[in-house]
Amino acid sequence: MTAVARLVTHVDLEEQATDASRLSVSARLEAVLTDGRTVVLLDDRGWSCSGPADLRDRLSATDIENDALTVVGPDEPSDGTTHDQMAAAHWAYLAGILRRHGVDADADVLRRLPVAVALSESLQAWVT
């Protein structure tokens, strides 16, 4: 049976809200399967930031990669839940998406997989 080989977060510019002092990006989390296929796990994530006119000079690719990992990861706890409970629910949700696509997925296994971040060419150009 097909399993998940790795996770990748693709990050891209949202052009309409980007200049030297503003950045708006989308983030899409995908599972790369052992048979080479991909399954989109999250495609509704992203963030925006604004700052001084030289914001572009202050943000590095590493900063953006770290933010991307945060937005596709478990949400912060609320209403009396713990970090562990939120993480368990997050990974169980992603495993459920994979199972609906016929992929053998275990939340604990997914949780231990590293998540690579792939910045789009346009975002790489904005950062440099």
Image: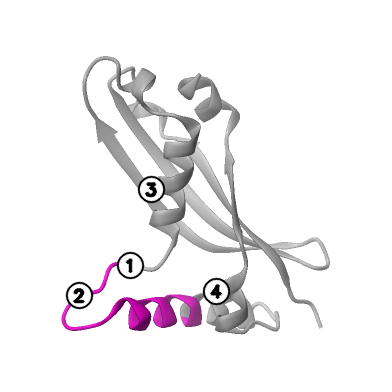
Q: Earlier in the sequence, mark 3 or mark 1?
A: 3
| Range of residues picked out in magenta | 75-92
Residue 15 as seen in the image, left or right of residue 38: left
**Of tags 1 and 4, which is closer to the observer?**
4
Residue at numbered disc 2: 78
Q: Earlier in the sequence, mark 4 or mark 3?
A: 3
Residue at numbered disc 3: 46
Q: Confirm whether the magenta stretch covers residue 80.
A: yes
For image coordinates 48% across by 37% down, the residue present is: 62
- Dot 4 crowding, Cα within 10 Å, few <14, some 14–19, many 20+: some
For image coordinates 79% across by 77% down, the residue present is: 2
Element under disc 2: loop
**Of tags 3 and 1, which is closer to the observer?**
1
Q: Please provide percent x and percent y for residue 100.
A: 61, 81
For residue 75, the mark is 1
Residue sitting nearer the eye, 77 or 123 = 77
**Of tags 2 and 3, which is closer to the observer?**
2
Q: Please provide percent x and percent y for residue 81.
A: 24, 82
